Image (tube, rainbow, N blue to C red):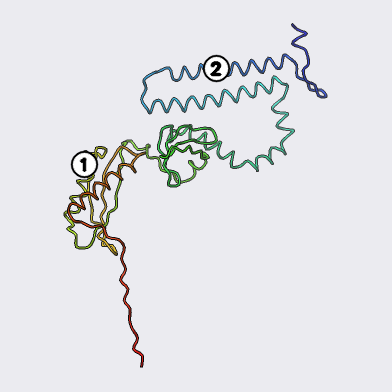
Amino acid sequence: MKDFLEYTLFEISNYSIKVQNLIEVLLIILITKIALLLLKKAIFRIKKVSKEREEDLYTVHKIFSYIIWTISIILILNSLGIKISVLLTGSAALLVGIGLGLQQTFNDFVSGIILLFEGKTKVGDILEVEGRLMKLSNIGLRTTEGIDRDGVSIIIPNSKIVTDKVINWSYQKEKIIRFRILVGVAYGSDVELVIRLLEESAREHPEVSKKRKIEARFIDFGNSSLDFELLFFSKTIFRIRRIESDIRRTINQKFIAHNITVPFPQMDVHLQTENRK
């Protein structure tokens, strides 16, 4: 058995890899996998937890997973006879060059650690990035994954979430948001009737909150129309476009029933003729 463990599999100059080294690497990987499995079961052993609690547990699991894998990689290198200190000293110039080329990647890694520790952005949150709404499905160490309203998977660098202007629709304590719909009607329309019809249209939708004030406002005299905005609250954030569409359809039906027209942009052109002698 001793001779088998001491058998050399690979040798270059003074460096060699023996069967014993290979077995140690395999054992470290196996122990790491078992440790991660036990960690996951220990963290998520509570079957019924609140959504906030589940997100916190997910963050803790991610952080400990990265720590365990880091320790495992160091042990593997040590088992193969590769000293970390010597490796870093001998490749200092190379690492500087690599570091300059991987500044953005390093920035993404640091941003990922910030996201995991800070806890303001969690799995399941609804984020608006560059005007696009997405629901987070995974927060990695370098990138964050999400699914938009069309079911398309989006992968974005963590640094964009940390440094850019990003709206987290799920961060506020009250999970209800106010939305608005802009409407223009023809000049001469009954303003009070328009306001009443707008508020009725929102109030009739089942996913519009009846506990919060539904309000229609006359906001401006437009170039071709009297401009109004309809304000309402809803807990349905990710699919709000569907609700807005339903309300617009109801508004259109009510306007037709009450002979209220939505004008199209118009422009008056005056022609002046020049008298010629």
Closer to the camera in the image, 70 or 194 = 194
Give the amino acid at mark 1: Glu
Report the side of 75 relative to 275 (left or right). Answer: right
Q: Position of residue 191 (x, y in %)?
A: 18, 57
Cβ atoms at labels 1 and 2 below 8 Å apart: no
Residue 259, image quadrant: bottom left
Mark 1, Cα crowd under 10 Å, few <14 / some 14-19 / many 20+, is few
Residue furthest out toward the right: 13
Residue 243 in the image: x percent, y percent? Answer: 30, 42
Return the residue found at the far bottom.
Answer: 277
Labels 1, 2: front one:
1
Q: Quadrant of the C terminus?
A: bottom left
How many dots with numbers? 2
Quarter where residue 228 is shown: bottom left
- Report x, y in % for residue 23: 68, 14
Q: Is 241 on the left-hand or right-hand side of 119? A: left
Q: Residue at x 50, y 18 (%)?
A: 39
Residue hosting label 2: 35
Nearest the viewer among 112 and 11 is 11
Q: Which residue is mark 1?
A: 204
Question: Which amino acid, mark 2?
Answer: Ala
Q: CA distance from mark 1 to mark 2?
A: 54 Å
Image position, residue 157 (x, y; %): 53, 40
Q: Is residue 4 above or below residue 105?
A: above
> Residue at 75% of width from left, 16% of height from top?
18
Q: Secondary structure at mark 2?
A: helix
* Picture quarter with the N terminus: top right
Residue at screen point 83% across, 24% down: 13
